[in-house]
Image (spheres, rainbow, N blue to C red):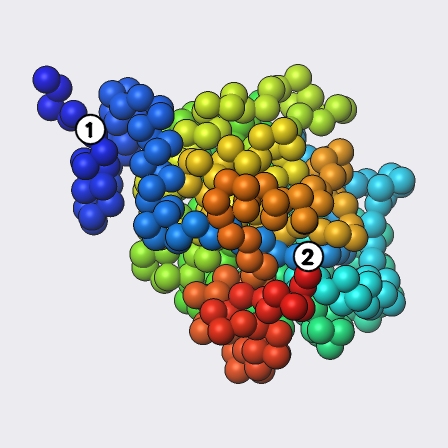
Amino acid sequence: MSELQFDFEIIHKINELKEIKKEGILQLLKEVPKETIFDTASNLRNERKGKRISFSKKAFFNIINLCRDTCSYCTYKAEPNDAKLSMMNLETVKGLSKLAKKYNCTEALFVTGERPEQKYSEAKRWLKNEGFSSTAEYLIHCSEIVLNEGVFPHTNAGNLTKSEMKELQKSNVSMGIMLENSSTRLREKGMPHEDAPSKEPKVRLNVLRNAGELKIPMTTGILVGIGESMEECIQSILDIKQIHEKYGNIQEIILQNFHPKPETLMSNHNTPKEDYFKTVVALCRILMPGANIQIPPNLSPNNYHEFLTIGINDWGGISPITSDYVNPEFSWPNIQNVEKKCNDLGFSFKARFPAYPEFIPLVNNELKQRISLIADEENYVEESYWK
Ligand SMILES: O=c1nc2n(C[C@H](O)[C@H](O)[C@H](O)CO)c3cc(O)ccc3cc-2c(=O)[nH]1
Ligand SMILES: C[C@H]1O[C@@H](n2cnc3c(N)ncnc32)[C@H](O)[C@@H]1O
Ligand code: MET
Ligand code: SF4
């Protein structure tokens, strides 16, 4: 019998250990059938989260998609003369918030490229014209507009400084930045982050730590299938876990499966194999049993429901009005259909705010008060509001 004979009991015990070693997890993958890993993850979810799946009814605000960096998987990024170029002025932001409110969306997801004003005079000029000197400053203003319309902003603008986050925290109930992966190998020549200094793992982990010091509920996650190894995924999860153990601010982990895009350097690269992706998802639950774990349903249109049996408890933002500008070829599923899928498999379906219920105590009093107007007793969105 091998020294490291893992079974269900042992996997449970792993969770009680303070320090989980990457080597042990890799060994576990060799010795335990994948079904055991998946079942364990599912049981842990049931134990820690109940049979309850959440989502956020959102509108995607494509604020500005010029970007200082180039990631070789990304088609969100535009060049100044592209048809897809987006620079949402304040009036458009206000208009979309009104529409979001009309559809009872509770989240305004703000996405931008990485500090576009540092590379493009077009961005700098446009911001100046609107009366701002940086993207971050503009986002602070946009957040206030959206909030005044009764929608809650959640900003993912890539790296932000601690002082920028401190300002945004006044109006944003939560914020996001994908770690993508903590492997520095992905920044080497020929790898997807070669031309993306903002994806330097140290830099991203530091943003998560700064957010921790500010007590901002943070969404982060891993982009799976961009040339990383299983070991590097495990290390990334452990790095996120370590930050959460220190600061308690990681509200959610998104596991996003890469999809190749024509005319990118990674156009010939495959989506991650299904078993590989599922193993990463299940391991994330095993390594962080109490975490909120999300997969975007639009990126697994034919089988998203299968992820319910491997430990996820959230679908992320689903928009009834805007497309997913990062993966525009994948439309959002209809919210009622997702609810039905959940119910059929024995799960309840709840709308949450951009900040998860257990993280709402971290937000400031003004935001808390606004939330309380449409929240149920558990800090989810009142069903009569969103349905
Ligand atoms: O609901 C959310 N979805 C977020 N999404 C998911 C997004 O709504 C879509 O699911 C994906 O863009 C699918 O392509 C993110 C995706 C990323 O890759 C990086 C960051 C985010 C951040 C959020 C977020 O904070 N909230
Ligand atoms: C906003 C987030 O979208 C993700 N992202 C960027 N490009 C792709 C792609 N081709 N497939 C899947 N996800 C992608 C990255 O994780 C980024 O952080
Ligand atoms: C499409 S990516 C949007 C957010 C930011 N540019 C990042 O990569 O983190
Ligand atoms: S993923 Fe984000 S940082 Fe990378 S190129 Fe796209 S917009 Fe820029």
Q: Nearer the viewer, residue 137 or 326?
A: 326
Q: Quadrant of the C terminus?
A: bottom right
Q: Do the CB atoms of the residues marked 1 and 2 lie less than 8 Å apart?
A: no
| Residue in view at x 43 percent, y 56 percent | 250
Disc 1 Cβ-to-ligand 2 distance below 8 Å: no
Tell me the crowding category of disc 2: few under 14, some 14 to 19, or many 20 or more residues within 10 angstroms, Cα based: many
Q: Quadrant of residue 351?
A: bottom right
| Residue in view at x 79 percent, y 58 percent | 124
The image position of residue 337, as x and y in percent, is 66, 43
Give the amino acid type for the residue marked by disc 2 in the picture.
Lys
The image position of residue 359, as x and y in percent, is 46, 66
Left or right: 91 as drawn, with respect to 295:
right
Assign a secondary structure to mark 2. strand
Assign a secondary structure to mark 1. loop
Residue of label 2? 58
Q: Earlier in the sequence, mark 1 or mark 2?
A: 1
Disc 2 Cβ-to-ligand 1 distance below 8 Å: yes
Can residue 114 be seen here?
A: no
Q: Quadrant of residue 350?
A: bottom right
Left or right: 201 as drawn, with respect to 337:
left
Residue of label 1? 6
The image position of residue 120, as x and y in percent, is 78, 49
| Residue in view at x 42 percent, y 61 percent | 249
